[in-house]
Amino acid sequence: MGIAERKEKEKRAMRQRILVAAMELFVDFGFQRVSIRNIAEKIEYSPSTIYLYFSDKNAILLELLNEGLDRLNEKILQHHQIADPVDRLIAYERCYLEFALENPQYYEIMFIQGLPIQRPEDGFATEKGERLYKVFEELLAECQAAGHLQNQNVRELTILLWSTLHGFCSLYIRQRLRFANIDDASVHDFIERTLLTIRSWLR
């Protein structure tokens, strides 16, 4: 490995170290309460080091949001070849729920915490977030074109469906479902039963 290649590898490693530290702090204390100095202290470097990689903490947050959305989109679109739109929608919903359970820190930052960089006109922080919404909206429209959900407003259904998925993910991640006996051992069975219910509703 040459000097230039080694330096580039070290830069990527440092950038990732900053992102991991920032995500942990944002989740534990909230974005507003975390400073660049806090992130620097966590990785045991000076704040000036952080500024070599990111202009401010908003830039770090945006990077984390985009990383999370990329991972979620990649997971969902692995099933784009499923022909039946209802089957495809159920597969997408399963991916969404599994992503939240497998990546609670990303999900917390993407969809739970109140964040300052959202566009006021539509509430999405990034174009990737808007595209994710469109994937579900267009798929529900496809379900309707196939004869399901007749005389229903697709936009309202999309919001209702997403709110249902998000509500469960948020409650589970924040450990608010223990009273209902939904824990790590039973959550996947609960998800499958829920998806069966949604499938019957879509049909």
Image (cartoon, helix red, strand yellow):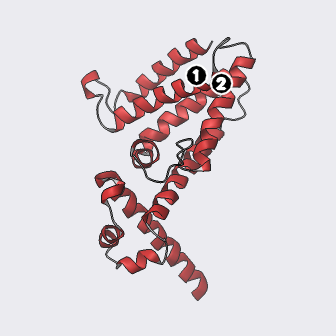
- Residue 17 visible in the displayed image: yes
Q: Residue at x 54, y 48 (%)?
A: 119
The front one of 15 and 58 is 58
| Label at residue 157 | 1
Tell me whether the residue at label 1 lies in contact with that at label 2, contact meaning CB atoms closer than 8 angstroms: yes
Question: Up-down: is 141 above or below 26?
Answer: above
User: Which callout, 1 or 2, points to the residue nearer the camera?
Assistant: 1
Question: Up-down: is 19 above or below 201?
Answer: below
Where is residue 189 shown, x and y percent of the image?
42, 24
Where the N terminus falls, by quadrant?
bottom right
What is the secondary structure assignment of the residue under circle 2?
A: helix
Where is residue 155 shown, x and y percent of the image?
62, 26
| Cα distance between the residues tagged 1 and 2 | 8 Å
In this view, the residue farthest toward the left is 179
Q: Is residue 17 left or right of residue 119?
A: left
Quarter of the image for residue 32 reads bottom left
Where is residue 147 shown, x and y percent of the image?
72, 12
The front one of 47 and 8 is 47
Where is residue 57 shown, x and y percent of the image?
42, 64
Q: Residue at x 45, y 76 (%)?
A: 51
| Residue that badge 2 annotates | 140
At label 1, which amino acid type do we have?
Leu
Q: Residue at x 51, y 21 (%)?
A: 195
Quarter of the image for residue 47 reads bottom left
* Crowd around label 2: few <14 · some 14–19 · many ≥20 (10 Å): many
Where the C terminus falls, by quadrant?
top right
At label 2, which amino acid type do we have?
Leu
